[in-house]
Amino acid sequence: MKPLRIHGLTKEYRTGFSCRSVMALDHLNLEIEEGEVFGFLGHNGAGKTTAIKLLMGFVYPTAGEAWILDRSIRDVGVKQYIGFLPESPFFYEYLTAEEFLLFYGQLFGMGGLRLAKKIDELLELVSMTDARHRPLRKFSKGMLQRIGIAQALINDPKLVILDEPMSGLDPIGRRDVRDIILRLKQEGKTIFFSSHILPDVEMICDRVGILVKGRLKAVGTVQEIAGASSVTSIELVVEGLSEGALAGVEGLDTTLIRRGDHVLIKLDDEARVNGLLEQILKHKGRVVSLLPHKRSLEDLFLTESGMNRT
Amino acid sequence: MKRIVVIALNTFKENLRDKILFNLVFFGLMLIGSSVLLGSLTIGEQAKLMKDLGLASINIFGVLIAVFVGIGLVSKEIEKRTIYSIIAKPIPRYQFLLGRYSGLALTLSVNIAIMAVGFALVLLLGSVSLDIGLMKAIGLIFLELLLIVAVAVMFSTFTTPTLSATFTLAIYVIGHLTGDLKAFGDKLENPLVSGVLNVLYYALPNLANFNVKSEAAHGIPISGNYLLVTVSYGVAYAASVMVAACMIFQRRDFK
């Protein structure tokens, strides 16, 4: 039983009174494995939020279908097993943190001691025990995000869907969210989240999918997508090489940049690095540093989304 | 059912914390001020005027709350995007709508109950006798409010708060004049226009039915039969409007 299966999910919005339509999501096919952290990437307007809105039943698909835990997303009952955090969460600001969690717990049909215990646990998890009697209107953005995550977990969900959980947060806030996601993974939950903060995604995701203009361009582990040989270039800093020796090195299809005693050598082909090192040692040069540049998710993202201008 | 109650109680809490019951202060001031003023202005008719004025105030404050809070019940949730976190829970959309509606109905009933008690106290202090007709009049005002809230909710499921307020107020005003629509239509010779007016007469709520304020103020008895028919009409109308609202709400996208 897959936590999430999406088949040909499509959403077309009509704009205003004109008959023009915008394809927000174009035949999305995707399967999420149990217990994995899946990062859904795409720039603003790529269709990430539309996909999530379709899954949560906020908008209806133009075509296609999706199943959560083998039940159609049209079945309201399946939401019993989902935890959801909306993008830049807006909540009832007149409620205190505790009342807020109580309200959402009751919507799941929970109550009594079980709910009270769960609320204590969650406030602890998101480090908000001190703020339990404070109204949400006095919360900072980071606090709102954390209490938002707490409400998403009130029902002990099997699948957690988070829409941009790290956007607008400071580095500490982002780290907190990252830690919470990893903890949920340890508990065996499946996490599906959208983001455009790539280093975070790279750090915590088992697999990622890249969405461009409503279409899924790539899906797989970061390594798979980036390619087996993900080293794109190598930079060496050397010292003590004579001009004659440098001329020899230059012949090896490299780029040289002189910085005083140091010379920065850039090599585009990883296979030639041994030959280059031999040359340097032969001419009594000293290697100060050697830095392989890997193809990061960011490069990949830019290439896939057709925005790479380099 | 349990979830409707949870949403209703949360809505009631929201109304209280938005200080909606503050209107009671103005109601009280108006009631006391006017009775003092009228006491010195009128001779003999004081009791009738006090009853008239009290019932009218209850009506006006009720309508204001019903329209302006009613239109926000759904549209505010969509605008503030609080609706996302609710729809994400295992609660059908119609239950959410009914919960919001019931919450405001609860607020209105508490509000009206307090106003009614205040009204009764002012009458007693002015040595005016209370009678059951006043209770009936207040009951029908409440029923009218329930109908107006349903209309406000229906409009706010598909249009902006400003338009919802405009439409709802328009329905309220026209609803009190539908009798004139029919009378006017009957006098016209053009069958098309009179047909349209007739359709409007039956389609729009006949709110004049709920207005027994002058009867109550003049001590004219309101029959049980009239009450029964009017209550059935009000409940049926409000229920149909809510069914329409649920159907619209069920189909719409929350972009």
Image (cartoon, coloured by chain):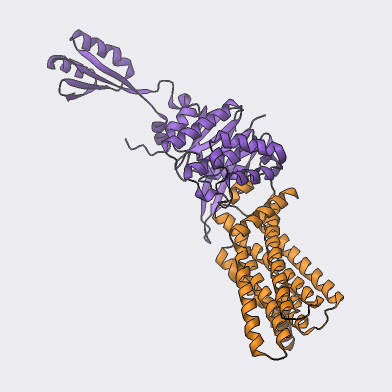
Picture coordinates of residue A124, whole percent (x, y)? 57, 34
Residue B7 visible (yes or no): yes
Residue most toward the bottom?
B43
Q: Quadrant of residue B208?
A: bottom right
Q: Which residue is pictured at 47% across the width and 27% down the height?
A: A222
Q: Nearer the viewer, residue A290 or B64?
A: B64
Picture coordinates of residue A206, whole percent (x, y)? 52, 27
How many marks do you count on the picture?
A: 0
Above or below: residue A65 compared with residue B179: above
Residue A75 visible (yes or no): no
**In the displayed structure image, the side of residue A278 where residue B135 appears, left or right:** right
Residue most toward the top?
A282
Picture coordinates of residue B58, whole percent (x, y)? 68, 73
Residue most toward the left?
A243
Above or below: residue B108 compared with residue B193: above
Q: Which chain is drawn using orange?
A: B
Q: Which residue is pictured at 73% across the width and 90% down the height?
A: B44
Q: Which chain is drawn using purple?
A: A
**In the displayed structure image, the side of residue B100 where residue B223 appears, left or right:** right
Q: Nearer the viewer, residue A257 or A103?
A: A103
Picture coordinates of residue B234, whole percent (x, y)? 77, 69
